[in-house]
Amino acid sequence: MIDQNRPEPKFDWFIPIDGDGAHIGTLRAERPPTFEYLRNVVETAERNGFYSLLIPTRFANGLFEEGAPLAETWTTVTALAAVTSRIRFLIAVRPGFVSTGLWGQMAANLDQISGGRIDINVVPGGIQGDFERFGETSDHAHRYERAEEFIAALRLLWSTTDPVDFEGDHVQLRGAFCSPGVVNGGPKFYLGGASDRALGLAGRQSDMYLAWILPQDEISAFFDRARAQFAAAGRAPGFGLRTHIITRPTEAEAWDAAEDLLSEATSVVKYQRQAVFAGTAMVGQQGQARIIADHRVGNHLWNGISTVRVNCGTAIVGSPEQVAEELLGYWKLGVDEFILSGYPHVEECDRVASGVLPIIKSLIDDERGT
């Protein structure tokens, strides 16, 4: 039975701060992540009616050779917010590298500048060695404890323009101000992760639990675990899904495009990715990078991208109709927000918007009886 009170699904796109191109895993991107190029991606997504844009956080390039050009998250999104008018930004942030109070003021100011168009993807964990690049040596448990205080302190700071105090083990605010504050209640918090600790944090603090795509039975199990955590905290769950899309007029053409995407990948980049995955404590990253024959995770799921990319490395592959049917299956499991991407991000944004989104929206309308 479909819940008629479910919100309309949202469809988001992605800002490729590592660089972009028709081929990935090369030493350098065919399209470097200049402001001009990323602005083109963002304006294309806004023109196509996407709801929001995920901008990730990295301390080294995670798609090409690790020393390749990389756009820093916060300065980039601030500039992009200033040249757009409607589309939102889902900004990934790692707690602990900027003081929580100061970061809260920065985020509130960007919320004001953008007219209330930002949300926050809190990322407590990270791939092997990434935090250490900038002197952070804390363990998994410490990072999650700090992230919980980070969110709680921000909610308090943004709740008033009066001075606030917050006394935690990792975060302290003593008479901290945030004025004029945030817009209309402020950003929503998105949290992901597959570990018990991550799911517990999401249940207590997130407005949206965000999962990387896996086969539907595995995602369903994660959602059941997340629902239990939301219920224990007395909160209503929301679910988002992050996936790449490779779509062409026919299934055969889509699989050819998937193969071509990696056709120029170098052994250097593959080795760098294997090195960071080998010792990672991230349960979700282990799931994305698992070795399967021909990278076929399912009939239309392919994790070949994980051989050259950190974090989400799985794509839905197929014709527009097949991709839409796959997305419908995840919607039936409870997903109300889909964060999509494809290489290169300008052309694939147009392709997905014109070919896939009308079909999936129609299928969902049919299911809802609207």
Image (cartoon, rainbow, N blue to C red):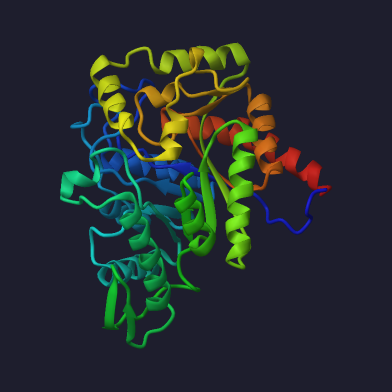
Front-most of 309 and 127?
127
Up the image or down, 131 lies above or below 289; here it is below
| Tally of numbered discs | 0
Give the image location of residue 249, x and y in percent.
61, 18
Q: Residue at x 46, y 51 (%)?
A: 198
Up the image or down, 278 lies above or below 119; here it is above
Give the image location of residue 86, x and y in percent.
49, 57
Q: Quadrant of residue 283?
A: top left
Left or right: residue 92 compared with residue 65: right
Taking the image as drawn, is residue 82 in sight?
A: yes
Taking the image as drawn, is residue 29 in sight?
A: no
Q: Residue at x 23, y 43 (%)?
A: 59
Q: Residue at x 48, y 42 (%)?
A: 13
Give the image location of residue 284, x and y in percent.
45, 38
Front-most of 341 and 87?
341
Q: Quadrant of residue 95?
A: bottom left
Left or right: residue 203 compared with residue 110: right
Front-most of 199 and 20?
199
Give the image location of residue 113, x and y in percent.
36, 67
Front-most of 261 and 291?
291
